[in-house]
Image (tube, rainbow, N blue to C red):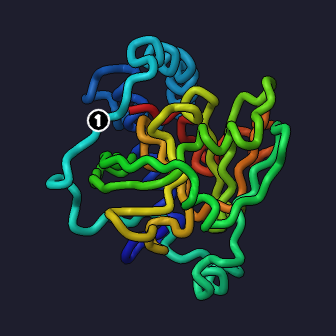
Amino acid sequence: MTSTGRSKAEHGRERRRLLRAALATAAGGVLAGCDRLSHDERAVRVLGSAEALTREVQRRLTGPALAQEFSPADIAPVFRSNGTTLPGGGYAALARDGFANWRLRVEGLVERPAAFTLAQLRAMPSRTQITRHDCVEGWSCIGQWTGVPLSHVLQLVGAKPQARYVVFHCMDVMTEGDYRVPYYESTDMDEALHPQTLLAWGLNGGALPIENGAPLRARIERQLGYKQPKYLHRVELVDSFAALGRGHGGYWEDLGYNWYGGI
């Protein structure tokens, strides 16, 4: 990820520092010790080990609850972009043709692997919702998203019983030090089947802009911004993360973020 006047490596280090500070605050509940703990590798590991407990507690408290939705008056005039704003490789050629040659492959632990065009996805039952995007860097933005519920697509392909996670593979390639990998993220089946979890192709009444993830991005509304991957081209159902990246379920998770980004 990049930001004005700062290198990608510097920005990555700052993101990890922010996350560690957030971990320390959430687990310890003491702001005064937050910065000190965020620089202690052992403390970060200990606090991160509480992630499963945090996830279970939140699930028990919220169950199938919906993320807050807002009114049209709350929509930001411009939805802030984050992370990559224009992938390299063959992305530009796909965009020039209006993504006519783009396909979303859905595979892995499914009964009927499939590849969908953008037109096919837009023709599926859709949902529109106005929600707030909360970034780990400390900013928020409200936008109106339109897309097909991920649960509908999973029903079409037939998720197998052993599938535990849905992995989103993206077209933007990320680099952090010597770690270079296409961006990827994941969620569990509970969030994948949640009614507000969308494969979104529209933003604020129009087509999804390139800087916001065209042609398709995931919206997992009860999770932080890094769990909302952009530039999707493949969805994979798996039973573990062992064969993915460094095995933690996401690009930023491989670099120290919590896998569960619930809000």
Could you tell me which residue is drawn at 50 percent across and 21 percent down? 55
Could you tell me which residue is drawn at 36 percent across and 20 percent down? 28
Q: Nearer the viewer, residue 139 or 11?
A: 139
Could you tell me which residue is drawn at 32 percent across and 28 percent down? 33
Which x, y percent locates residue 106?
A: 75, 50
Quarter occupied by residue 209: bottom left
Does residue 175 appear in this view?
Answer: no
Could you tell me which residue is drawn at 75 percent across and 34 percent down? 159
Name the quadrant of the C terminus: top left
Q: Does residue 119 appear to the left or right of 112 in the view shown? A: left
Which x, y percent locates residue 64?
A: 45, 22
Q: Nearer the viewer, residue 179 or 201?
A: 201
Q: Nearer the viewer, residue 30 or 222?
A: 222
**Dot 1: what SS?**
loop
Does residue 159 appear in this view?
Answer: yes
Q: Nearer the viewer, residue 252 or 166?
A: 166
Which x, y percent locates residue 15?
A: 45, 52
Q: Does residue 192 appear to the left or right of 134 in the view shown? A: right
Q: Determine which residue is flagged by label 1.
A: 68
Relative to 128, is 174 above or below?
A: below
Q: Does residue 46 appear to the left or right of 247 in the view shown? A: left
The disc labelled 1 sits on which kind of residue?
Gln
